[in-house]
Image: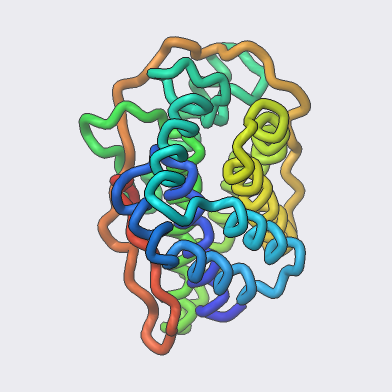
Amino acid sequence: MTAITHVHRARLYKLASMAFDRPDEQFEEALLSGTFEEQLLESAAALENEELEEHAAAVVEAAPTDEDGADDLYSDWATLFGFEEGGNISQYQIEYSPGTLVTSTDVLADISGFYGAFGLSMDEGNRERVDHLCIQLEFLSHLALQTAYLEQDGDETGIEVLTDAQGSFLEDHLGRWTGRYRETVAEDADVEFYRALAALVDGLVADDTDRFDIEPREFEETPPSPLEGLNDGEGDFRCGTCGATPSGSTAEMPMGDRKGPY
């Protein structure tokens, strides 16, 4: 794989994280300026996956293009995913996996271990858990971009470490529940933008599953949450090293308001 391939992977994960996060002014600006549309379509096309391109086109088709539509999107997000509106669609891995409180705590510890291994820490004061969809997408964006840097430097050892980490994280975590998440959004959300976005995320993960030659065991059912009402008090992670593009690349990484690795 080339450095530019990893840059476009990183950008797609970043855009998906921004879009599934609570809408803010920066995301609204990206929508209304056409930046979100342009970058999403460019990066999907760069990966040369026809199905992924179709998903990206569906997201763009459903995305709001004016201020009223962007305002509606905020309300839609709060209704579907926000605690303040009693949203019934969870964006946490644990909610889609079977297991007890003990096994779920082990899963959270394993996810935290992935982040810590690459110098990432949760941002103090933010109350998201480490298994949140947007944080996991941010993490893979970070690893993909770091891989692009090492590809340009010819660091074969570093590339191998990052490749193994991405494959393992997808196989053990994100790749196990994006299919369930996509089904839940398709069934419970009446907002086409988020339905198309969930399909895009699942398609991106499927593309990487093939790329890294892995076979995640998808969770088959969604049990009652073993951690419902429990929050570890930790927040988002920040690495402060992402957001730049390897020299020689024309792709730009999107900006976002989430305090993650960009």
Q: Quadrant of residue 177?
A: top right
Question: Would residue 122 appear left or right of 72 to someone viewing this image?
Answer: left
| Residue 107 can be seen in this image | no
Q: Quadrant of residue 85?
A: top left
Identify the residue shown where x is 52% and y is 79%.
4
Identify the residue shown where x is 31% and y is 53%.
26
204 vs 258: above or below: below
Question: Would residue 224 appear left or right of 218 to someone viewing this image?
Answer: left
Q: Quadrant of residue 181?
A: top right
Identify the residue shown where x is 58% and y is 41%.
194
**Which quadrant is home to the C terminus?**
bottom left
Q: Nearer the viewer, residue 139 or 179?
A: 179
Q: Nearer the viewer, residue 48 or 122?
A: 48
Residue 56, position as x, y percentages in the image: 63, 60
Q: Residue furthest left?
A: 125
182 vs 8: above or below: above
Residue 219, position as x, y percentages in the image: 73, 30
Residue 117, position as x, y percentages in the image: 40, 48
Residue 76, position as x, y percentages in the image: 49, 32
| Residue 13 can be seen in this image | yes
Identify the residue shown where x is 41% and y is 89%.
248
Colour pattern: rainbow
Question: Would residue 174 appear left or right of 115 to someone viewing this image?
Answer: right
**Which quadrant is home to the N terminus?**
bottom right
Give the tally of numbered discs: 0
